[in-house]
Amino acid sequence: MEQHYEKFQRGYSPGKRYGRAWKRIRDRYVHKHPLCEQCLKEGRYVAVEEVHHIVPLAEGGSNDESNLMSLCRSCHEKIHHERGDR
């Protein structure tokens, strides 16, 4: 019953999709890039909330630092909205 609840009622779970290895990669990247990279380009200093894959894993992207980007939640949502995948 609980698995059914988790799978169908709870929706997306980043922990299940990415796992511990991703958490380590993400934490290391956030340590190096603590501010939203999009906001920084515009002269704003906003703390990172999300680590974004520039090329999504589902489209052949990787967890390499060259494919990652620190973003605030607002910038992250904007990127996904523009892509049409959220």
Image: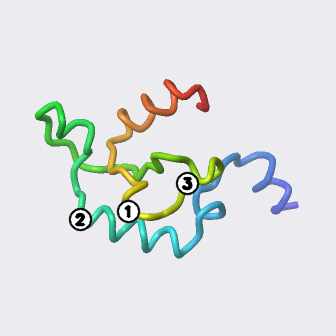
Q: Secondary structure at mark 3?
A: loop
Q: Dot 1: within a 10 Å radius of its alpha carbon, few (fewer than 14), some, or many (20 or more) residues?
A: few
- In the figure, is residue 72 to the left or right of 13? left
Work out whether mark 2 precedes mark 3 in sequence or the reverse, and give the earlier one: 2
> Mark 3 touching mark 1, by CB under 8 A?
no
> Mark 2 touching mark 1, by CB under 8 A?
yes
Instruction: Between label 2 and label 3, give the one nearer the viewer.
Output: 3
22 lies above or below 53? below
Instruction: Look at 32% across and 42% down and name the residue there.
Output: 72
Q: Measure how far apart labels 3 and 1 are at the Cα level.
A: 11 Å
Instruction: Look at 55% across and 54% down and name the residue there.
Output: 61
68 lies above or below 19? above
- In the figure, is residue 6 to the left or right of 53? right
* Residue furthest right as drawn: 1
Q: Dot 3: within a 10 Å radius of its alpha carbon, few (fewer than 14), some, or many (20 or more) residues?
A: few
Specify the label residue 61 is tagged with.
3
Type of residue at label 1? Glu
Viewer-nearest residue: 9 or 86: 86
Q: Quadrant of the C terminus?
A: top right
Type of residue at label 2? Lys
Q: Measure how far apart labels 2 and 1 are at the Cα level.
A: 10 Å
Residue 9 location (% of width, % of height): 77, 46
Type of residue at label 3? Gly
Total marks drawn? 3
Q: Dot 2: within a 10 Å radius of its alpha carbon, few (fewer than 14), some, or many (20 or more) residues?
A: few
Specify the label residue 32 is tagged with.
2
Instruction: Between label 2 and label 1, give the one nearer the viewer.
Output: 1
Q: Measure how far apart labels 2 and 3 are at the Cα level.
A: 20 Å
Residue with the mark numbered 1:
65
